[in-house]
Image (cartoon, grey):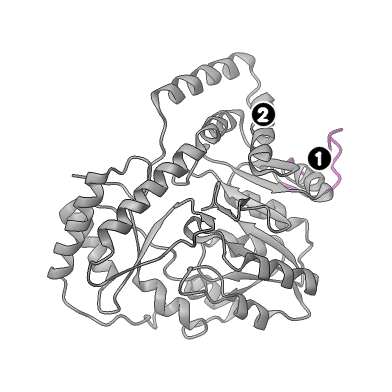
Amino acid sequence: MSISGSCPYFSNQSIDEITNEIRSMLKSGKLTDGPYGQEFEKKFAHYNNTKYAIAVSSGSASLDVALRHYELRGREVIVPTNTFIATPNGVIFAGGKPVFADMNAQTLGIDIEDVKRKVNRNTAGVIVVHIGGLVCPQIHELKAFCRQRGLFLIEDCAHAHGAMMDGKKAGTFGDVGCFSFYPTKVMTACEGGMIITDDDEIAKETRITRTNGQNTDRYMVMLGHNWRMSELSAIVGKNQLEHLDEFLAKRNQVAGWYQEALLDVEGIELFHKPPNFRHSYYKYPIKLADTIDRIKLAGTLKEQYGIETGHVYYPPCHLHPYYKETYGTRAGDLPTAERVLPQVMCLPMHCGVTKENVKYIKNALITALTKLPLQSITVSSAL
């Protein structure tokens, strides 16, 4: 048996619909800046109950474009160390300096108290990442703090398509929401990203920035790049959006199977979803006991059982060589992330996972754990 860690889902009906629209798009000769991209934006804005949705070429581009608005040269932006490198890199490309905050061990998201400690006169804003598809449970507190201190708040929603807290969608709590449609995500456009906002000025400026800084009259009025989404990606993304709620229902069903199967497995601790949340379950993380070597366990599951696993994210950003060399970050700076993340393993999560797969994964985990030598895990000084 082989079980992939992630996999996009297309029904036969979706494949037919996408194929027909691609055929029409190719015949039209309009391969970018066309009706499919405009329709995708309109439907994405409606789905999230926002005024604007601006399609771009990738999730990284959504952060790059949004951050350009804030004129960050000489300023700092607080970002979680537990995120993909695209998050802090977007700050750097916009001329700012990322300042890494520690994480909450229960949610894997940003530690709000550490954010508050790290704000200073040079801080321009905060980026919160909804890790694994769980909206940051302290988002209201974080939003109020940012407003009080005059800071922008960007939501990195790369994991959180359709996720909600108290009926409100991820990406609509802060000033800007940034999404990725990479093939591993909850919904895909092959490649692509989306920015959502209710701010008229941000929407106007991001549309210009994504088009080499040109306005609708093709005059260059600011510096930008070609960050546009192709019509092909818009066709795929538009179709995926139509089925997003179905994908979320299936992912939550798979999560329920995992919850039931793994609740009493020794050496595994589960993360629990609060009752007023809709989790998108981009990932299904579990925490391994400190005596279990996650890397060896992942290797055993892959090589002997065909089970692909992942993590979120190790090493944390502040321990990557570039950030250490550029900003002087080092081991010991963010102790919770350094302690917890080596032990977080993500099990296969996508619409193709069956109840039988979950039973197989449980049995493989139990068997593999009995074979592994016990070992204490520490952060490598080489990182």
| Foreground pick, 169 / 69 | 169
Give the mark count: 2
> What residue does disc 1 label?
214
What's under tag 2, amino acid-wise? Glu
Which residue shows up at 64% across the image and 50% down it?
62
Magenta residues? 211-224
Compared to residue 230, the image places residue 137 above or below, namely below
* Residue 215 image position (x, y, % from top left): 84, 38
Crowdedness near tag 1: few (<14), some (14–19) or many (≥20) residues, C-alpha within 10 Å:
some
Question: Which SS class for mark 1?
Answer: loop
* Residue 357 image position (x, y, % from top left): 24, 47
In the image, which disc is placed on residue 327? Answer: none
| Foreground pick, 360 / 6 | 360
Is residue 190 visible from the viewing direction of this image? Answer: no
| Foreground pick, 367 / 231 | 367
Does residue 214 show up magenta in the picture?
Answer: yes
Compared to residue 217, the image places residue 25 above or below, namely above
Q: Quadrant of residue 259?
A: bottom left
Task: Give how far apart the Cα atoms at labels 2 and 1 are.
Answer: 21 Å
